[in-house]
Image (spheres, grey):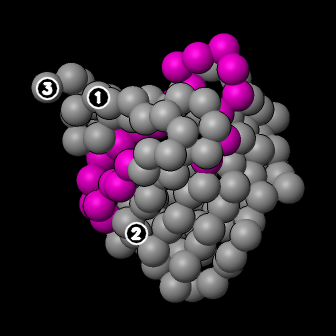
């Protein structure tokens, strides 16, 4: 398991290939864990296992509880967060997995985010803040 010391997010990799990445993620604190971004080539599925998660996908805000799955198509701006005071557990699947696991490990270890964004341009790009529609 790896943990982001800045956000408290914890990730355990279940399946890690170039084609598929499956992670168990726990969002331990309320609030955003990432800035608005998109994955140019990767589709992302958030399956909520426990708790409640909030999402803003292409400007549209929604929430999901245990048993629900949110899909973010490749190239779609999004951000996700824990809107509660309780932990949220999710299974996050990314297809293709590309090098997202390596990006996450290095980011959580404290490497320079700007340099990582340049190196992992197939995996992630930042976008301007996402307003509500």
**Location of mark 3 (residue):** 133
Q: Residues within 10 Å of mark 3 (few under 14, many from 20)?
A: few
Location of residue 40 by image quarter: bottom left
Query: What's the CA distance linking mark 2 and mark 3?
Result: 24 Å
Query: What's the CA distance linking mark 1 and mark 2?
Result: 21 Å
**Location of mark 1 (residue):** 61
Residue 22 rendering spot, x and y as whole percentages = 62, 68
Q: Dividing the image into 4 quarters, which one contains the N terminus? A: bottom right
* Magenta residue check for 14: no
Q: Secondary structure at mark 1?
A: strand
With 83 as the anchor, is 62 left or right in this view? left
Q: Dividing the image into 4 quarters, which one contains the C terminus? A: top left
Q: Residues within 10 Å of mark 2 (few under 14, many from 20)?
A: many
Q: Nearer the viewer, residue 78 or 53?
A: 53
* Magenta residue check for 71: yes
With 4 as the anchor, is 85 left or right in this view? left
Q: Which residues are magenta?
A: 70-90
The answer to whether the residue labelled 2 contacts the one labelled 3, judged by CB atoms less than 8 Å apart, is no
Kindly tell me whether residue 110 is visible in this rendering.
no
Q: Secondary structure at mark 2?
A: loop
**Location of mark 2 (residue):** 42
């Amino acid at each position: 398991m790896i943990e982001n010391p800045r956000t408290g997010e914890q990730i355990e990799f279940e399946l890690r290939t170039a084609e598929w990445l499956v992670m168990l993620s726990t969002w331990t604190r309320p609030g955003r864990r990432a800035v608005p971004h998109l994955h140019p080539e990767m589709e992302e599925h958030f399956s909520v296992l426990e708790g409640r998660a909030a999402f803003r996908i292409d400007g549209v805000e929604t929430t999901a509880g245990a048993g629900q799955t949110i899909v973010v198509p490749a190239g779609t701006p999004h951000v996700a967060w824990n809107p509660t005071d309780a932990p949220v557990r999710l299974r996050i699947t990314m297809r293709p997995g590309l090098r997202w696991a390596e990006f996450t490990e290095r980011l959580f270890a404290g490497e320079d985010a700007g340099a990582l964004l340049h190196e992992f341009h197939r995996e992630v790009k930042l976008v301007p803040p996402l307003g509500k529609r």
